[in-house]
Image (cartoon, rainbow, N blue to C red):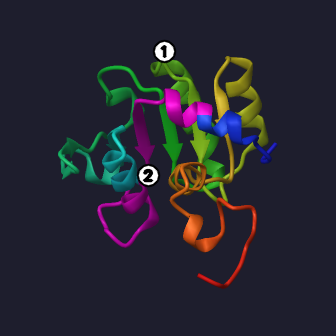
Amino acid sequence: MTNYSDPFLKGILHRTKTVAVVGVSMNPVRPSYYVARYLGLKGYHVIPVNPRHAGEQLFGQVVQESLAAIEGPVDMVDIFRRSEAVPDIVDEALAVLPDLRTIWMQIGVVHAAATAKAEACGVDVVQNLCPKIEYQRLHGELRMGGFATGVISSKL
């Protein structure tokens, strides 16, 4: 399923405090960078995860090599990897993050079997959406573009 109710998405965004962003880039023009930065600016504790940059600093946090390297609770894993990488990420998340409540797959990322596995373990899953865009939409930050009004218009 990739059609989620607004209360479902808003509930996830409200209860989430810590987000592990898997596949985060150090490049400020990459979506994973600015989504992670935005979430941090909105008060989420963002843990960057990328084995290529493990040990480096991003947004005042040490980039982790893997989900298993994270110390402390994680509420949500935000996946910025191709769909074929999702099963391994979900397996690791389920194995090492006991407080995990949500797996969020970015726009274009879907995996039915991994979703079913996570949901069977009681974890909410969102596919093919961006938490930054959904946060903005649900909190009226996209109103100027018509997104929060229910009317899409080229007029500003």
Q: Position of residue 147 (x, y in %)?
A: 66, 64
Q: Is residue 9 above or below residue 70?
A: below
Q: Residue at x 46, y 20 (%)?
A: 96
Type of the residue with mark 2: Gly
Q: Is residue 100 left or right of residue 49?
A: right
71 and 51: which is toward the camera: 71
Q: Quadrant of the N terminus?
A: top right
**Residue matched to label 2:** 23
**Residue matched to label 1:** 98
Q: Image quadrant of residue 126?
A: top right
Q: Is residue 31 left or right of residue 113?
A: left
Q: Is residue 121 above or below residue 16?
A: above
Q: CA distance from mark 2 to mark 1?
A: 21 Å
Q: Position of residue 124 (x, y in %)?
A: 66, 28
Q: Is residue 24 above or below residue 66?
A: below
In reply to whether residue 118 is colored magenta, the answer given is: no
66 and 150: which is toward the camera: 150
Q: Position of residue 73 (x, y in %)?
A: 38, 20
Q: Residue at x 55, y 64 (%)?
A: 142
Q: Quadrant of the C terminus?
A: bottom right
49 and 16: which is toward the camera: 16
Secondary structure under badge 2? loop
Type of the residue with mark 1: Pro
Q: Badge 1: how crowded within 10 Å, few (<14), some, or many (20+)?
A: few
Q: Badge 2: how crowded within 10 Å, few (<14), some, or many (20+)?
A: many
Q: Residue at x 55, y 55 (%)?
A: 140
Q: Position of residue 151 (x, y in %)?
A: 75, 68
Q: Earlier in the sequence, mark 2 or mark 1?
A: 2
| Magenta span of residues | 11-35
Secondary structure under badge 1? loop
Q: Is residue 70 left or right of residue 74?
A: left
Q: How many marks?
A: 2
